[in-house]
Image: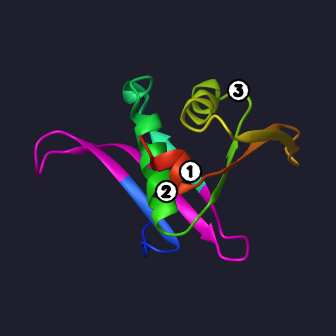
Amino acid sequence: MVNVDYENEMALVALQGWPREEAIVSVAAYFVDKETNSASVAFMTRDDYQNQGLGTFMLQSLIKLAIAGGIRKITAEVLPGNLPMLHVFRKTAGNMRSRAKAHPQNHFRYLITGKFTERSYLDP
């Protein structure tokens, strides 16, 4: 996330605290796959800031930026036990689909896919 170019890679950071003393409490990013015109999203929110709507806000903001950049589909891999993140995706983008995807480490991840349009997501 160091080489954000605002076109193929976008990152958002949530800060807490006063200027010059602030701490990062959440990071959200997407990475564009030009072949499919889709973006893969990733999140990190500090434990003591979870369950306060921050992940939802970050996902909503990423979706708006992706739509503005011409992206109409996002994907994410979420471990089945990460119920708070699965909830964020369901709440923020109810039209998302998920399917289990096996990995070599003998665990499953959900591949979450959603398609968005400016009208369906950005209109009040």
The residue that label 2 is drawn on is: 29
Q: Quadrant of residue 15?
A: top left
CB under 8 Å between callouts 2 and 1? Answer: yes
The residue that label 3 is drawn on is: 81
- The residue under the point 83% across, 38% down is 108
Type of the residue with mark 1: Ala
Furthest residue in direction left, as rendered? 19
> Where's residue 17, x and y in %?
16, 39
**Foreground label between 2 and 3:** 2
> Where's residue 105, x and y in %?
85, 44
Q: Is residue 105 left or right of residue 1?
A: right
- The residue under the point 43% across, 44% down is 58
Q: Disc number at residue 42?
A: 1
Which sits earlier in the primary sequence, circle 2 or circle 3?
A: 2
Q: Dot 3: few (<14), some (14–19), or many (≥20) neighbours within 10 Å? A: few
Is 61 drawn above or below residue 85 in the view shown?
Answer: below
Q: Quadrant of residue 46?
A: top left
